[in-house]
């Protein structure tokens, strides 16, 4: 088994009677950028703490590089870590902070000097060696934290909402840099975030967590386009979830329109039809009687620049969001206009209601 | 007008008036009137040299500093672990430790000193127990000597150190300690390389406060010490009360005051609360 692989086997952690993490299993191959995504309280940080060794699970095993690490303290795991608040030691300067993981392991001085220089160059902080955290901007502190996480060349790096405190532009910039460093060093990154956009941009695979369980696990495009349940659908970006019910052989949605979907047969009669706003096309005029065609009336039109977001009333009080690209020759519909909404069967899914 | 809008000097005025009225004015008057008895400035200087470089004063100053240093060291050695336990304790344990530290703080020094005398005397509890257990053949001399003074003062001064250190330790972000652990540090390394440096300003503050208070001690050494354990405050009292030699008392007061103010200047430079760390 390769050194950078990580696995959780049916891991459970309870605080009192409440299971914060309930039977989570995952296997991460070496070199993967793996993201734990979820709202606060979903158990993602506790899961990361068990990987780090700060928290010992009540049940299950933590395996790294094929070795059982369940009860090994953090210092025996040889991981790199980036903390949510950066956790830069205020009494040490940048060079001493970055050197910390090496010096506590008793690395010889020339090696420490060389590796610190290398790590600082990688995060573009050469020349900042003698500064203290209070003399650095948020973005620079983030880089120090990153350099410190990679300085010992760990096979696995854990990152707990590392970009949470940065503004949007800097965030994007750092996302690209983290990704670039990860690829260059070939390290496994386990990344915790509640920002779905960040998760989609950076990850090879995403585990979406909900109330201590993994709701869905897969590559970004798969979890975005093929959610397994309404939680995942609604958590990742905007989603239309339309009430639908079975009527003999067909499924009917708002206003009794026949809906065809690519996958998913709801267990009971009640179901939700999932379709992303950008997959819905809006055309002027009346509906043809075809599956996945809904007549409607525009309620709002929000001009967002590159796209126009319509809220369309589509019968039975259902509101459908549609994102129309503001492409060449695009016609804007006005509130009150009668329109027809349509989408491809393979872009929609029927989920349990 | 809201209180916060008043100029700073006006808000400080009550405290300044009090300080001036009950401290600065009396001490100034005491110093000036005492020294004036000696005559001209040249006379004062001559007398001052004679007093300050006399063997008696020299020995007392040495005593005072020696006792102050030993007591401060002991208070630090006992206070650091106690403060650490206090900063980590929760709920009942926290309340219990805090009560044990602070309750004596609210009791008069004389009462506490007499309580120690009951414990430490030749027929006191400690000697009785040790004799009873057969650990010693004859009672130990724990009172009316240096040992007694050091024990008594250490006890009285402990709360000042503990509360000062507690404030510094509580200000350490526990996430920094966890981060150090996560980056491979052993518990000993977490303490030596992160926790201790981050609480060093508290140690400096605690040591200075304890030492400043220790060198001005009067009651404890007077009651628990022997003839060899005279500290400067006791000498000042003796000059004022017994020999009525006010000029000498005034000079010794100046010495004590000067040392205290110098140490306080160091304190306010390096141990400002909330600074978080020593400036380099």
Image (cartoon, coloured by chain):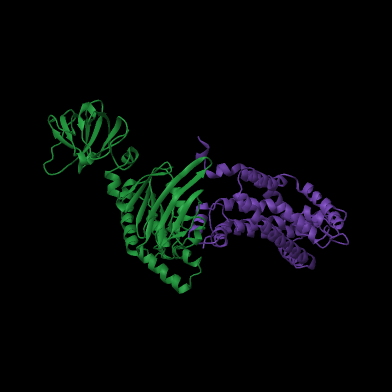
Chain colours: A green, B purple
Q: Position of residue A269 (x, y in %)?
A: 30, 29
The residue sitting at the front extreme is A249
* Res. A126 visible in picture: no
Decide which of B209, B34 is in the foreground and name it.
Answer: B209
Residue A237 shown left or right of residue A282 in the figure: right
Q: Is residue A8 above or below residue A259?
A: below
Decide which of B209, A272 is in the foreground and name it.
Answer: A272
Q: Position of residue A303 (x, y in %)?
A: 21, 38
- Residue at the image position 37 percent from the left and 52 percent from the top: A163
Residue B234 shown left or right of residue B94 in the figure: right
Decide which of A319, A241 is in the foreground and name it.
Answer: A241
Q: Position of residue A146 (x, y in %)?
A: 40, 59
Q: Is residue A174 above or below residue A335?
A: below
- Residue at the image position 60 percent from the left and 59 percent from the top: B266
The number of numbered discs placed on residues in the rendered structure image is 0
Q: Position of residue B232 (x, y in %)?
A: 76, 59
The residue sitting at the bottom extreme is A110
The residue sitting at the left extreme is A329
Q: In the rendered view of the protein, which quadrant contains the N terminus of chain A?
A: bottom left
- Residue at the image position 74 percent from the left and 65 percent from the top: B62
Q: In the rendered view of the protein, which quadrant contains the C terminus of chain A?
A: top left
Residue A291 shown left or right of residue B178 in the figure: left
* Res. B263 visible in picture: yes
Q: Is residue A113 above or below residue A73?
A: below
Q: Is residue A280 above or below residue A206?
A: above
């Amino acid at each position: 088994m390769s050194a950078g692989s990580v696995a959780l086997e049916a891991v459970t952690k309870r605080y009192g009677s409440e299971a914060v993490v309930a039977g989570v299993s995952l296997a991460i191959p070496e070199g993967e950028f793996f993201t734990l995504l979820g709202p606060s309280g979903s158990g993602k940080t506790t899961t990361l703490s068990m990987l780090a060794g700060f928290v010992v699970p009540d049940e299950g095993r933590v395996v790294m590089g094929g070795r059982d690490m369940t009860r090994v303290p953090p210092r025996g795991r040889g991981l790199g870590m980036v903390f949510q608040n950066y956790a830069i030691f205020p009494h040490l300067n940048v060079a001493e902070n970055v050197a910390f993981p090496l010096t506590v392991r008793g690395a010889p001085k020339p090696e420490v000097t060389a590796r610190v220089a290398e790590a600082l160059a990688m995060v573009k902080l050469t020349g900042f060696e003698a500064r203290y955290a209070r003399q650095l901007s948020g973005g620079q502190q983030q880089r120090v934290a990153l350099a410190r996480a990679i300085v010992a060349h760990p096979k696995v790096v854990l990152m707990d909402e590392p970009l949470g405190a940065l503004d949007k532009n800097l965030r994007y910039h750092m996302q690209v840099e983290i990704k670039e460093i990860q690829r260059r060093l070939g390290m496994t990154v386990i990344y915790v975030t509640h920002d779905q956009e960040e998760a989609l941009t950076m990850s090879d695979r995403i585990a979406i967590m909900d109330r201590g369980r993994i709701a869905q696990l897969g590559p970004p495009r798969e979890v975005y386009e093929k959610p397994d349940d309404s939680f995942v659908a609604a958590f990742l970006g905007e989603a239309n979830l339309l009430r639908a019910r079975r009527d003999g052989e067909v499924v009917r949605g708002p206003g009794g329109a026949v809906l065809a979907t690519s996958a998913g047969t709801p267990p009971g009669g009640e179901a939700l039809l999932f379709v992303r706003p950008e997959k819905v096309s809006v055309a002027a005029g009346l509906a043809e009687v075809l599956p996945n065609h809904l007549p409607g009336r525009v309620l709002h039109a929000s001009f967002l620049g590159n796209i126009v977001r319509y809220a369309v009333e589509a019968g039975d009080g259902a509101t459908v969001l549609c994102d129309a690209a503001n492409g060449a020759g695009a016609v804007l519909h006005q509130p009150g206009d009668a329109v027809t909404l349509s989408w491809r069967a393979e872009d929609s899914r029927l989920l349990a209601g | 007008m809201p209180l916060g809008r008043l100029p700073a000097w006006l808000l400080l005025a009550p405290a300044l008036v009090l300080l001036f009225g009950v401290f600065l004015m009396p001490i100034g008057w005491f110093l000036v009137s005492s020294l004036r008895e000696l005559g001209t400035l040249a006379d004062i200087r001559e007398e001052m040299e004679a007093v300050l470089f006399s063997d008696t004063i020299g020995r007392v100053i040495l005593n005072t500093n020696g006792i102050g240093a030993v007591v401060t060291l002991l208070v630090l050695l006992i206070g650091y672990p106690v403060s650490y336990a206090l900063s980590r304790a929760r709920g009942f344990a926290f309340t219990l430790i805090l009560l044990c530290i602070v309750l004596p703080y609210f009791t008069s020094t004389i009462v506490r000193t007499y309580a120690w005398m009951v414990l430490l005397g030749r027929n006191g509890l400690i000697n009785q127990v040790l004799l009873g257990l057969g650990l010693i053949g004859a009672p130990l001399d724990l009172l009316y000597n240096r040992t007694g003074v050091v024990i008594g003062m250490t006890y009285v001064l402990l709360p000042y150190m503990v509360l000062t250190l507690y404030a510094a330790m509580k200000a350490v972000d526990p996430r920094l300690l966890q981060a150090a652990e996560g980056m491979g540090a052993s518990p000993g390394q977490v303490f030596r390389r992160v926790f201790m440096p981050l609480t060093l300003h508290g140690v400096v503050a605690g040591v200075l406060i304890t030492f400043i208070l220790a060198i001005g001690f009067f009651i404890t050494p007077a009651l628990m010490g022997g003839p060899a354990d005279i500290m400067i405050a006791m000498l000042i009292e003796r000059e004022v009360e017994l020999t009525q030699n006010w000029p000498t008392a005034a000079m010794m007061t100046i010495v004590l005051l000067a040392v205290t103010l110098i140490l306080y200047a160091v304190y306010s430079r390096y141990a400002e609360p909330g600074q978080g760390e020593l400036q380099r």
